[in-house]
Amino acid sequence: MVDLFRLDGKIAVVIGGAGGIGETLALGLSQNGAKVVVASRNLERLKEVAKEIQAKTGGEVMALQVDVTDEDAVASLVEKVLAKFGTVDILVNAMGLNIKREAVEYPMEDWDLIFNVNVKGTMITCKHFGRVMRDKKQGKIINMSSVRGIRGYTGGNTAYCATKGAVELITKTLALEWAPYNIHVNALGPALIITPGTIHIQQNPELAKKYKAIIPMNKLGVPEDLIGACVFLASEASNFITGQTLYIDGGLTAG
Ligand SMILES: NC(=O)c1ccc[n+]([C@@H]2O[C@H](COP(=O)([O-])OP(=O)(O)OC[C@H]3O[C@@H](n4cnc5c(N)ncnc54)[C@H](OP(=O)(O)O)[C@@H]3O)[C@@H](O)[C@H]2O)c1
């Protein structure tokens, strides 16, 4: 039987590939046969991650530096990926950040920073990798939204929610624009996922209880919860799906 989820021979680029979620997505893609490039600003950390994944899967993993807010750097990343592998099949935009502050106090330089990485960065990487995919008339792009891309949240999340809403509409619009080129553009929409950046929530029983209480499944997510959806959206199993955000949220957005 053909395994629709296998990614053998595919070239995947995971931006934010050393992050709490990105590292695990890169591992999942490698476990399923893809050759993986992990990319972000911290090259030393990326090299460690590449080594760790390679040791676990035996697959080819390469670390490359990029700042997604710098269009020339992204163009250069594309060139390096093409020079090494000749093509690119899968782009996962797993970078991003949140800066929480009450709206009346929100520093607009933080607004610009979060929009530059989460929104402009997503557009720039889609633009440059999308060009290659358009020429070959094939590609899978997976952007990173959040449950906060579809719902409003208190707690100083105005900027973050706005960026993730924008990521969802970039995803839908590119899906339409690039459907004739057989490029699938989808997004993942996780609820809280426990990573080094959010571990303090799990470690604080009261806080963890509060976060769990809004999840119908009454549990917090872990990065591994995202692997299946990412591999699905990167693989032939999702060949008639584009412009969607797949929420990985224990039922949160069902209500
Ligand atoms: N964790 C959650 O609960 C959760 C829930 C929903 C959605 N998300 C989304 O999932 C994505 C990953 O989150 P995470 O929890 O894994 O965060 P994380 O651990 O902080 O990882 C984010 C990664 O983004 C990279 N990055 C930041 N700015 C960059 C830039 N200018 N250029 C290139 N790379 C950049 C960072 O790498 P460098 O420092 O090396 O550049 C970092 O590895 C984000 O989009 C986040 O909004 C997370």
Image (cartoon, rainbow, N blue to C red):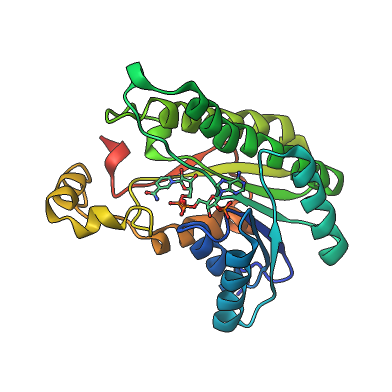
Q: Residue, x 48% and y 29% (percent of image)?
A: 110
The answer to whether residue 53 is above or below residue 67 is below
Q: Residue at x 75, y 38 (%)?
A: 71
Q: Is residue 56 visible?
A: yes
Report x, y in % for residue 103: 35, 20
Q: Residue at x 57, y 64 (%)?
A: 26
Q: Is residue 164 left or right of residue 216?
A: right
Q: Which residue occupies the foreground of this view, 224 or 32?
A: 224
Question: Looking at the image, how many numbered discs can be counted on the residues?
Answer: 0
Q: Position of residue 209 (x, y in %)?
A: 14, 50
Percent x, y of residue 170: 60, 30
Q: Is residue 4 visible?
A: no
The image quadrant where one finds the C terminus is: top left
Relative horizontal placement of residue 44, taking residue 137 as reference (left or right): left
Q: Position of residue 176 (x, y in %)?
A: 67, 30
Q: Nearer the viewer, residue 82 or 137?
A: 82
Which of the 4 image quarters holds residue 130?
A: top right
Up-down relation of residue 32 to residue 168 (above or below): below
Q: Residue furthest top?
A: 104
Vertical position of residue 42 compared to residue 109: above or below? below
For the residue pair 14 and 116, the one nearer the viewer reads as: 116
Q: Specify whether 146 is left or right of 115.
A: left
Q: Residue at x 64, y 73 (%)?
A: 33
Report the side of 72 relative to 150 (left or right): right
